[in-house]
């Protein structure tokens, strides 16, 4: 009786131990987990829903690192199902890959349109505005427009380097067409001028100065066309005109014969010099000036199609080639 009881007790204990051992083994090998699905697609096993959230948040961060303004979302809420799986299975999963495939993104991009053509695409509105400013600074007459778009993938985003190249191209294309320099000197004196042919050129003494601030430049020679009674010296608009030699201003005003604002200086010995087409006059009749003194600012007044200085030398009222004097400089 006693031995029977001992046997039963022993058996119960053994069976108990056996079950415990099996149970512990199962617990160690199989884990309680959740299976996650999105839209019916199996994503993987997670220890709990919180772990799913953590991985999801990792992936959101991954996208935000590319563009902080991206909208990241799942098309539908995940569903979870509790179950047990082998430990080893947990390690073989590709939850990142599977979940990444389910993640939807919406990026906001800013297209920069120039005269209706899409030229650049940025993820930051600031950057697009920056390039609009740069373009407007370089090209006055340009139509720019920033177009906001929502896209699911970031494609064809313009790098700064590329944007700079495009900018330079647009500026190039929109450069104002260079107008060929207008033919300078169309002065046709309407009053009779006699080209001096006599042998006697009065000797002049004293310092001589090239009358235009552009030293040595000549646009049109004396007599280069019929009736050209002076020489056209290169000059820019508003640059100084100098007295050729010491002398007395005999005229400073509007020349009715085509020389515009004109100065005439008497240097004595019958030599008078004319300075035509000025934009403004700095001396007045009766004033004594010395060689090199600023007497006017060059321009294109009177019968002239571009800024230059018409310089004329007259001996006893007859025009002579100013080269006779200028070539001494
Ligand atoms: Zn001239």
Image (cartoon, rainbow, N blue to C red):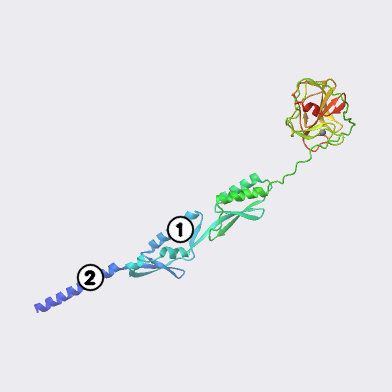
In this view of the protein, can residue 6 be seen by the observer? yes
Q: Which mark is residue 267?
A: none
Classify residue 209 by image quadrant: top right
Q: Residue at x 15, y 77 (%)?
A: 8
**Which residue position is annotated with label 1?**
60
Q: CA distance from mark 2 to mark 1?
A: 44 Å
Q: Looking at the image, is mark 2 or mark 1 earlier in the sequence? A: 2
228 horizontally vs 39: left or right: right
Quadrant occupied by the C terminus: top right
Quadrant occupied by the N terminus: bottom left
Residue 85 spot, x, y in % from top left? 34, 69
* Residue sitting nearer the eye, 291 or 74: 291
* Residue sitting nearer the eye, 15 or 290: 290
- 299 versus 272 height, above or below: below
- 221 versus 36 height, above or below: above
Q: Residue at x 61, y 46 (%)?
A: 134
- 304 versus 178 height, above or below: above
Residue 202 spot, x, y in % from top left? 84, 22
Q: Which mark is residue 21?
A: 2
In this view of the protein, can residue 128 be seen by the observer? no
* Residue sitting nearer the eye, 279 or 74: 279
Quadrant observed for ligand 1 in the rendered image = top right
């Amino acid at each position: 009786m006693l031995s029977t009881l001992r046997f039963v007790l022993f058996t119960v204990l053994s069976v108990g131990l056996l079950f415990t051992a099996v149970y512990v083994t199962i617990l160690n090998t199989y884990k309680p987990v959740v299976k996650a699905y999105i839209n019916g697609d199996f994503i993987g096993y997670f220890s709990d829903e919180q772990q799913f959230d953590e991985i999801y948040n990792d992936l959101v961060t991954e996208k935000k690192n590319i563009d902080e303004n991206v909208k990241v979302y799942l098309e539908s809420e995940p569903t979870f199902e509790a179950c047990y799986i082998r430990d080893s299975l947990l390690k073989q999963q590709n939850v990142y890959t599977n979940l990444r495939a389910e993640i939807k993104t919406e990026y906001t991009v800013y297209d920069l349109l120039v005269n209706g053509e899409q030229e650049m695409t940025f993820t930051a509105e600031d950057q697009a505005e920056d390039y609009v400013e740069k373009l407007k600074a370089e090209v006055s007459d340009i139509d720019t427009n920033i177009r906001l778009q929502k896209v699911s993938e970031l494609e064809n985003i313009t790098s700064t380097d590329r944007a700079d190249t495009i900018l330079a191209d647009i500026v190039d294309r929109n450069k104002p067409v260079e107008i060929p320099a207008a033919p300078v000197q169309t002065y046709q004196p309407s009053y009779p001028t006699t080209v001096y042919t006599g042998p006697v050129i009065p000797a002049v003494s004293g310092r001589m100065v090239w009358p235009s601030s552009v030293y040595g430049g000549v646009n049109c020679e004396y007599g280069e066309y019929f009736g050209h009674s002076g020489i056209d010296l290169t000059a820019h608009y508003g640059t100084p005109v100098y007295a050729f030699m010491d002398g007395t201003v005999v005229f400073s005003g509007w020349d009715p014969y085509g020389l515009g604002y004109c100065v005439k200086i008497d240097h004595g010995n019958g030599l008078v010099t004319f300075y035509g087409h000025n934009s403004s006059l700095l001396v007045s009749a009766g004033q004594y000036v010395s060689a090199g003194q600023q007497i006017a600012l060059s321009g294109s007044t009177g019968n002239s199609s571009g800024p230059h200085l018409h310089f004329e030398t007259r001996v006893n009222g007859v025009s002579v080639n100013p080269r006779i004097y200028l070539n001494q400089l």
